[in-house]
Image (cartoon, rainbow, N blue to C red):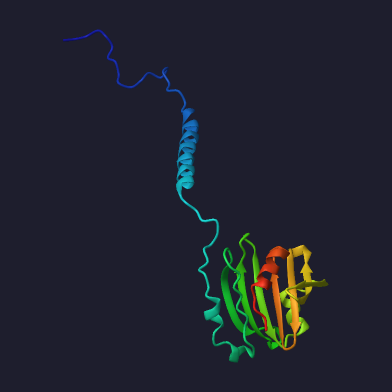
Amino acid sequence: MTSTEPEQSAAPSAGVRRPPRRQSVSGIVLTMLVVGGFALGLWALVPRQSGIPQPAVDVGQAASGLQDQLGFAPAVPTPGPGWTATSTSAEAGVDGVQTWRVNYATPKGSWVSLVQGREATRKWEGVQVIDGAEQGTVAVDGRTFVVRARPDRQLTGYVLRDGEVTTMFVGKASRAEIEALVRATPLR
């Protein structure tokens, strides 16, 4: 059988062209948006903490047995609900001053430290308040404290120079919170 019709080839003719793939860029962008939306959705579902959780510290237990090391009985504040002791330390500080430190998170989310030093020097005291200048005095529970502050760092310190032991309350908390810790601290 012979045919007079020309055979049709399987290949498209040279005159028919496929359209360029302009949709590939928009497809990539659309895919990225879908994946980004999915990732954002997962991120929104994952619970996050507002801060690093700190285990509560037993200040009384930490202070027990330190009198011989420090050369004085360290104060143990009992500030009440909302206050969390975050750390304690007993060590030789600047100028070899034996130092007891208790750091607290306040109910309003700030911090205050009780710092005590035996035979404290002015240099030791200055380090505790980042060389904050003296700004007068304040009376709390019948005791007169020297106020030292660094307003540029929102740092306030109450200093009680009482014989061999200097006691300081230093922090970025309000004066009301600092004074609350002062009242909660039995001083000899």
Residue placed at 72% from the left, 74% from the top? 141
| Residue at x-position 47% and y-position 51% | 47
Is 115 in front, or is 31? 115
Q: Quadrant of residue 104?
A: bottom right
Query: Which image quarter holds the C terminus?
Result: bottom right
Residue farthest toward the front in the current orientation of the protein: 142
Point out residue 152 in the picture as x, y percentages from the top left corner.
77, 63
Q: Residue furthest left?
A: 1
Residue 61 horizontal/vertical position (percent)? 52, 80
Horizontal relation, residue 32 to residue 155: left or right: left
Classify residue 9 as left or right of residue 104: left
Frontmost residue, 79 versus 108: 79
Vertical placement of residue 44 versus 17, above or below: below
Q: Horizontal and vertical percent for residue 185?
A: 64, 76
Q: Residue furthest right?
A: 136
In the depicted structure, whether residue 147 falls above or below residue 174 = below
Toward the top, the furthest residue is 4
- Classify residue 187 by image quadrant: bottom right
Q: Say if 122 sits above or below 147 in the image.
A: below
Q: Nearer the viewer, residue 82 or 119?
A: 82
Q: Is residue 65 above or below residue 45?
A: below
